Image: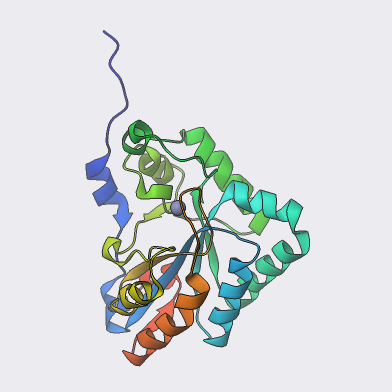
Amino acid sequence: MIKSKRRIYLREWIRYSKFAGTEGAREDKLVALSFDDGPHPDNTPRVIEILKENRIRATFFWIVENAINLSYSHPIIFKKILSEIKNNGYEVGLHAPNDLKPTIYSRFFGHFTKQELGEAKKKLETLTKTDVNLYRPHYLQLGSGIIHANQLGMTTVLGNLLKVVRPDGQIRSQVKTLSQAGAGNIIILHDGQNNQQGKNRILDVLPEGVRLLKNKGLKPTSVSKVLEN
Ligand SMILES: [Zn+2]
């Protein structure tokens, strides 16, 4: 009998994933802002402008195919995004090689092979000219991707799953979710647009959300900053 090697890596998903920052980050009142599904020609530059106005860092989890497409379709915008990321201390993590929606089967048992993830990591490193050490599985898949990422030397960051800001939800409810974050949380936002989403309202939500976080005495920053110390 051929035994299938495919299985749900639920235990590993919990063991290897980062859901929140360190105790030091909580004491320092840090909260991580992370943006999935980009880069996007309109949203990403404008999110960066909002971050710059507020003098805060953040992390972008990119779909590699989106980055490659953007480098061809909007080369000047893409170069500007890369230089802003470098100059302002933002970071880029791997989200997925492409935006193909997983099936119910692959969502649970693994959507990308280790080779596909490894190649995507390398492409992203070539494009950004930096090491890519963070991984957040697209659709938060429970399959083998998390094991592959671990073997490829990446840290999987799921973040605070109760603080996923749905990109096409009502503006008021998105701001509310964002502003309810606490010290040490890793907030999941979206600057890109995947196949499933309608309108992405991040640009209407982010300025007010950041203002409310700061009013609570929290310091928004990148994922690495809440994972270190
Ligand atoms: Zn995603």
Residue 86: which quarter of the image?
bottom right
- Horizontal side of 211 relative to 87 (left or right) equals left
Quarter of the image for residue 84 reads bottom right
The answer to which of 21 and 207 lies nearer the viewer is 207
Q: Which quadrant holds the C terminus?
A: bottom left
Give the side of residue 218 with respect to residue 207, left or right: left
- Give x and y (percent) for residue 200: 50, 64
- Residue displayed at 58% across by 40% down: 119
Name the residue furthest left: 11
Residue 30 is situated, as x and y percent measured from the top left of the image, at 36, 80
Is the residue 68 above or below the residue 167 in the image? above
Position of 229 relative to 190 (above/below): below
Residue 112 visible at all: yes
- Residue occupying the point 39% across, 34% down: 103
| Colour mapping used in the image | rainbow
Residue at image point 77% right, 64% down: 76
At 48% across and 57% down in the image, what residue appears?
A: 198
Q: Pinpoint residue 88: horizontal percent, then vertical percent.
A: 60, 77
Direction from residue 184 to residue 170 in the image, left or right: right
Give residue 164's position: percent from left, percent from top. Answer: 34, 63
Q: Is 118 in front, or is 58?
A: 58
Q: Is residue 227 shown to the viewer in this render? A: no
Q: Nearer the viewer, residue 214 or 147?
A: 214
